[in-house]
């Protein structure tokens, strides 16, 4: 039997589940924001993605 100290509490499991839900929702929104219309051309799409990687990603702590 696992000792009480090693088992995660119900509260910790609930918090972990909520974090996972919020992270999933955030990632879906982020993916939608990074979608670039094809009609604007390859050069414009490359410029937008480069700007995101240069300015937004470091601000969010992405590497």
Image (cartoon, rainbow, N blue to C red):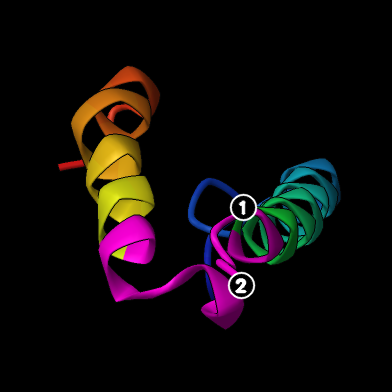
Q: Height in image: 10 above or below 43?
A: above
Q: Secondary structure at mark 2?
A: loop
Can you identify the residue that label 2 sits on? 37
- In the rendered image, residue 19, in percent from the top left (x then y), is placed at 71, 47
- In the rendered image, residue 11, in percent from the top left (x then y), is placed at 84, 42
Main structural element of the magenta stretch: helix, strand or loop? helix
Q: Secondary structure at mark 1?
A: loop
User: Furthest residue to the top?
Assistant: 59
User: Residue 52 versus residue 37: which sits nearer the camera?
Assistant: 37
User: Residue 18 versus residue 23: which sits nearer the camera?
Assistant: 23
Q: Look at 78% across and 43% down and name the residue there.
A: 15
Q: Residues within 10 Å of mark 1 (few under 14, many from 20)?
A: few
Q: Quadrant of the N terminus?
A: bottom right
Q: Look at 48% across and 55% down and name the residue there.
A: 6
Can residue 1 be seen here? The reply is no
* Residues at marks 2 and 1, CA–CA distance in whole angstroms: 53 Å
Can residue 22 be seen here? The reply is yes
**Cβ–Cβ below 8 Å for labels 2 and 1?**
no
Q: Give the magenta part as a residue range.
A: 31-45
Question: Horizontal placement of 51 versus 31: left or right?
Answer: left
Query: Is residue 28 located in the magenta-colored stretch of the structure?
Result: no
Q: Height in image: 35 above or below 14?
A: below
How many badges with numbers are in the image? 2
Question: Horizontal placement of 14 versus 32: left or right?
Answer: right
Can you identify the residue that label 1 sits on? 4
Which circle, 2 or 1, is nearer the viewer?
2
């Amino acid at each position: 039997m696992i000792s009480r100290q090693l088992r995660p509490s119900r509260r910790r499991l609930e918090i972990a589940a909520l974090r996972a839900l919020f992270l999933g929702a955030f990632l879906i929104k982020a993916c939608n924001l990074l979608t670039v219309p094809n009609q604007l051309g390859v050069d414009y799409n490359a410029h937008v993605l480069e700007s995101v990687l240069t300015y937004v990603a470091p601000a969010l702590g992405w590497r």
